[in-house]
Amino acid sequence: MIENALRYSHTLLKNTVINGDKVIDATVGNGGDTVFLAKLVGKTGHVFGFDIQSQAIETTKEKLLLTSLLEQVSLYNDGHENLNLYLPKNIEIAAAVFNLGYLPKGDKNIITEGDTTIRAVENILPRLRKGGLLLLTVYSGHPGGESERNTVLDFTKCLPQDLYTVLYYGFINQKNSPPFLIVVEKK
């Protein structure tokens, strides 16, 4: 079976992130990716998680406590565009994950936006290790989603080919704006 965007992102992460790595969850949401990443990096690695909604941070913290994974995670109730304020200066990142849109089961009026997402991506790309991945799962079927989708696509299409490989992965025959995945790999 063909994997959907989210499952495919996890497949890629399993093949890239190893024990001891440093990774970013730029939109922790309800904590699913944060827990997944914390398992991949193990006790010697670290996950830096960001979300502008305190509800997302609290939900994620609870899941990490229940799975005994909080020790290797730092959570920040701030926008991902500000991640450079929190990350150690010369840290090398194995992977960074974004789920764009709104918080599932949350306030659908609070959404990620193209300009802040691009600022976060611009801050992450120089930190990616060779072979590192930046994954953007794009949900665009909500007010404001189309604008962010276009901004992210326009930006990633223009990344220099000699430095990055960019993959677009998504279903093209489904209704209701299915999510798609953009994968940026550092060469």
Image (cartoon, rainbow, N blue to C red):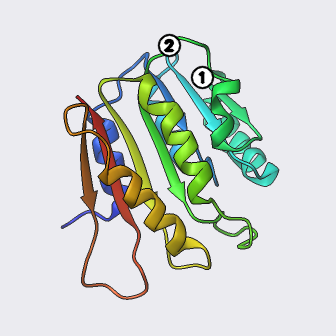
Confirm whether residue 38 shows in the render.
no
Q: Residue at x 61, y 14 (%)?
A: 88
Relative image position of residue 168 (x, y in whole percent): 27, 58
Q: Residue at x 62, y 50 (%)?
A: 116
Of the pair 6 and 153, the residue shown nearer to us: 153
Residue that badge 1 annotates:
72
Q: Quadrant of residue 89?
A: top right
Relative image position of residue 162 (x, y in whole percent): 19, 32
Q: Note whether 104 is above or below 172 in the view shown.
A: above
Q: Earlier in the sequence, mark 2 or mark 1?
A: 2
- Farthest residue, direction right: 54
Confirm whether residue 54 shows in the render.
yes
Q: In the image, which disc is placed on residue 19?
A: none
Q: Residue at x 68, y 35 (%)?
A: 82
Of the pair 39 and 149, the residue shown nearer to us: 149
For residue 137, side relative to residue 90 (left or right): left
Q: Quadrant of residue 86?
A: top right
Q: Note whether 2 is above or below 163 in the view shown.
A: below
Amino acid at the residue labelled 1 = Gln
The N terminus - image quarter: bottom left
Mark 2 to mark 1 CA distance (whole Å): 7 Å
Q: Quick check: marks 2 and 1 in contact, CB under 8 Å?
A: yes
Q: Residue at x 78, y 46 (%)?
A: 58
Q: Secondary structure at mark 1?
A: helix
Q: Secondary structure at mark 2?
A: loop
Relative image position of residue 186 (x, y in whole percent): 29, 31
Q: In the image, which disc is placed on residue 44?
A: 2
Amino acid at the residue labelled 2 = Thr
Relative image position of residue 57 (x, y in whole percent): 74, 45
